[in-house]
Amino acid sequence: MGSGLTLIIKFHEAYVLVNNMFCVKFMRLAHHVAALVTLFAAGTTLLQAAPALAAADTAALQPQREVYRIACDENFAPLSFVDEQGKLQGIDVEILQLAAARAGFAYQLIPLPFDVIVPRLLSGQLDGALGGISVLEQRRQILDFSHPYYSCGLAAVARCDSGIHTLEDLAGKTVIVKRGTLGSMFAENQASTLRFSVKYCDTSPQMVTAVQNGAADFYLEDYPVVSYHLAQGRHPGLMMALPQVSATFDYAFAASRGQHVELISLFNQGLQKLQDDGSIDAILQRYGLRSNPR
């Protein structure tokens, strides 16, 4: 009986051991199977979602308006301006025309004074804008921007007899700038450092007249604008005293932040094609400007 009982006990222990091993392996197998099921389900979900995501991406590049209302600065040659025949001309005007044709969207171009363009974008009266609009961090808080299409800096223009040739020569002088522009922001930031006073106006011609008449000593304007006008001989008695007084900045197409993401995407799509085939450089050269330094 003793040896028989011992055999029975050992047999039972062996059974328990094998059973436990089987259970552990079964649980591990079940765990792996469950994991595979989860992965399969996730993969199926992703596959089902892919067409929807692709459709969403495609929709983002579809015009949301039959005709977009786009503004440009009415007096900012050579970027955008109304010529003597009342026709809109300029680098930005031509870029928009070609980009819209390549990307497939329609627009109405509305010439406006620069200082009303951003407020009208924010109020929803406009869908987009361009015409020498510089990309600034302050503006990024309220505007969406396209990829940049040109880079430049600010130039200082003074009378030929002004004696202004360096930044130090600006001390004690008076600058006139357009409200709401990069020139006005630069002047306000540097007035105490460079020790000059600041006057304001609404248009580029008003700046030119003020300096010509002695109401101000110099004005600040984007380099391509200054270069174009002086080359055309349109501002007699004036010179580019300082070709670059600021860091380089970018021009881009703008829309109210979050309101017309599809329009920014469409413009970028057309712009990329123009950059790839050399169209932008050709436009710049027609207006006497060097190829985009970017």
Image (cartoon, rainbow, N blue to C red):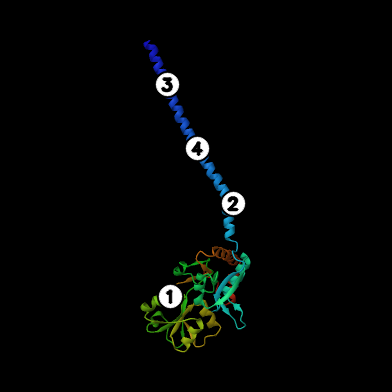
Residue at 46 percent of width and 32 percent of height: 27
Mark closer to the observer (2, 1): 2
Which residue matches tag 4?
34
Which residue matches tag 3?
14
Instruction: Give SS at disc 1.
Output: helix
Mark sitting on residue 185: 1
Mark closer to the observer (1, 4): 4
> Residue 130's quadrant in the figure?
bottom right
Q: Distance between the residues labelled 1 and 4?
A: 62 Å
Residue at 59 percent of width and 59 percent of height: 59
Q: How far apart are marks 2 and 4 (CA)?
A: 27 Å
Q: Tell me residue 152's x, y (percent).
A: 49, 73
Tag 3: amino acid: Ala
Q: Tell me residue 172's x, y (percent).
A: 37, 84
Residue furthest to the top in view is 1
Instruction: Give SS at disc 4.
Output: helix
> Residue 261's quadrant in the figure?
bottom right
> Residue 281's quadrant in the figure?
bottom right
Instruction: Give SS at disc 2.
Output: helix
Q: Distance between the residues labelled 2 and 1?
A: 47 Å
Q: Tell me residue 19's x, y (percent).
A: 44, 25
Which residue matches tag 2?
51
Instruction: Give SS at disc 3.
Output: helix
